Image (cartoon, helix red, strand yellow):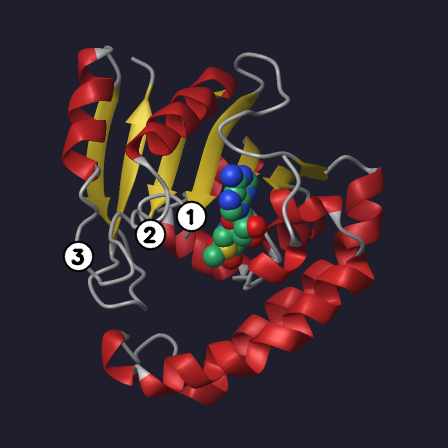
Amino acid sequence: MGIILENTIPLGRRKEEYIAMFNIQQEELTYSILDCGGGPSSFNREMTKDKGNVVSIDIIYQFKDTEIQNRIDETFEDMMKQAQDNKDKFVWNHIASTTELRNLRKTAMTMFIEDYQSGLKEGRYIYAQLPTLPFRDNEFDLALCSHLMFLYSDILSYEFHFESISEMLRVASEIRIFPIVDLNCNQSAYVEDIMASFKAKGYEVTIEACGYEFQKGANKLMRIKKH
Ligand SMILES: C[S@@+](CC[C@H](N)C(=O)[O-])C[C@H]1O[C@@H](n2cnc3c(N)ncnc32)[C@H](O)[C@@H]1O
């Protein structure tokens, strides 16, 4: 199953961004939360510091902190240049400028790297690869997936989405996925079929607006719940 770190582009978001994009309510901050594809986000670290209960899984967690940091250093400037070159694809509102974007992402990833060793030891960062999760049935209240599913619909198959969502629903009572658009800012071609499939299986599936929009049109999440 090995992946090559050189094929990944690590980019991480902050806790405040997760809260906004997933419509996380104050009382939900105490839930046991699984972050799928957590990458170099600081969500786990910031939640842990605030007495939260978060486990993150990602394929990059098989690598050492120095290896992930090197990969961040190799790719960061290019990612920022791409954001600058494609400025019209983003809403410069909450994040007002490329300077702010740079600071936000750097801060998130620095916080992640500083937390990574202790998080690995404490079992808060676990190497795993969707669509398989190394957890018991219903181990979590909530499973989140930020900027992985739907966004990369051009390279990740419908089967990958279906199996990953099924697996997230096996281990958590509720799941939330953000965004539901692809990289071209169009609603993912999988959204309708995923909704129909999981409704047919008896789940409550909703799409709801959230208070976060950076990539244009990426302002809705999908919520799937057990009845
Ligand atoms: C764009 S990053 C998003 C990181 C974080 N969720 C955030 O929003 O800041 C996508 C992450 O998904 C991870 N990933 C890709 N395929 C995966 C898979 N099959 N299973 C688990 N993680 C995966 C990548 O390694 C990367 O860290």
Residue hosting label 3: 186
127 and 114: which is toward the camera: 127
Asked whether the viewer can see residue 36, the reply is no
Horizontal relation, residue 185 to residue 27: left or right: left
Mark 3 C-beta to ligand 1 under 8 Å: no
In the rendering, at what x and y percent does residue 3 appear? 63, 46
What residue is rendered at 52% in x and 19% in y?
A: 171
Dot 3 amino acid type: Asn
Residue hosting label 2: 151
Residue hosting label 1: 148
- Labelled pair 1, 2 in contact (Cβ < 8 Å): yes
What residue is rendered at 46% in x and 21% in y?
A: 167
What residue is rendered at 24% in x and 57% in y?
A: 219
In the displayed structure, would residue 142 be above or below residue 139?
A: below
Marks 1 and 3, the one that precedes in the sequence: 1
Quadrant that contains the N terminus: top right
Mark 2 C-beta to ligand 1 under 8 Å: yes
Circle 1: element type: loop
In the rendering, at what x and y percent does residue 108 appear? 61, 66
Cα distance in 3D space between marks 2 and 3: 9 Å
Say few, some or many: other residues with alpha carbon within 10 Å of mark 2 (under 14 / 14 to 19 / 20 or more).
Answer: many
- Labelled pair 2, 3 in contact (Cβ < 8 Å): no
Dot 1 amino acid type: Leu
Circle 2: element type: loop
Cα distance in 3D space between marks 1 and 3: 15 Å
